[in-house]
Image (cartoon, helix red, strand yellow):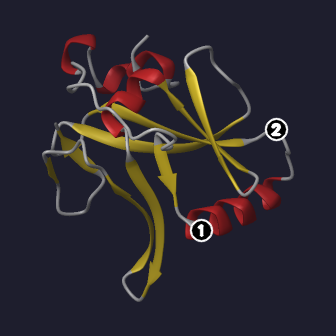
Amino acid sequence: MSACQSQPGAASSCSPGTMSPPPAVELPEGAEPLNISPAVVSKVSAMLAEEGDPNLKLRIFVTGGGCSGFQYGFAFDDEHKPDDVTVEKEGLRVVVDAMSLQYMMGAEIDYEDSLEGSRFVIRNPQAASTCGCGSSFSV
């Protein structure tokens, strides 16, 4: 199943042919597939507390689109799909479907709050290039 098919409403933003997997990446023994920063843990934990549903997790996914070919998406989700990979840090559960994880393996997920605004930042070693705003990338 592609990330396009696994995300509600995302099928119209890409076609199955646009998401060919990047080359396989080997992580060092014991390394997490995603690195979640303490700033993400703090911000998302506060947001989840406001939602009041202990079953919610942060879902990060990749879809076709954006100015560089692929774009990141974030959503709260209470479902766990068979191909999901879960990364837990300080009680925060982050889930990524297997297709999206191929494009994000080893990425650092961070949250920045500055005079320019607040945003999630993904530093992705799989990305060959990114757009100026950092919300889309190519492999």
**Mark 2 surroundings: few (<14), some (14-19) or many (≥20) residues within 10 A:** few
**At 38% from the left edge and 44% from the top edge, which residue is drawn?**
106
Give amino acid for label 2: Asn
Q: Is residue 53 above or below residue 48?
A: above
**At 20% from the left edge and 12% from the top edge, which residue is drawn?**
17
**At 48% from the left edge and 53% from the top edge, which residue is drawn?**
35
The image quarter in which residue 85 lies: top right
Give amino acid for label 1: Pro
Q: Is residue 48 above or below residue 105?
A: below
Of the 4 image quadrants, the one containing the N terminus is: top left
- Label 2–label 1 contact, CB within 8 A: no
Query: Where does residue 50 sit, x and y in percent of width and height?
Result: 80, 61
Q: Which of 70 and 103 is in front in this view?
A: 103
Kind of element beneath mark 2: loop
State how many labels appear: 2
- Among all residues in the image, which is located at the extreme bottom? 115
Query: Where does residue 118 sit, x and y in percent of width and height?
Result: 47, 74
Kind of element beneath mark 1: helix
Left or right of residue 133: residue 99 = right
- The numbered dot on residue 38 is 1
Q: Nearer the viewer, residue 59 or 36?
A: 36
Q: Is residue 30 above or below residue 13?
A: below
The numbered mark, 2 or 1, whose residue comes first in the sequence reads 1
- The numbered dot on residue 3 is none
**At 16% from the left edge and 36% from the top edge, which residue is drawn?**
139
Query: Where does residue 71 sit, x and y in percent of width and height?
Result: 31, 41
Q: How far apart are marks 2 and 1 (CA)?
A: 21 Å
The residue that disc 2 covers is 55
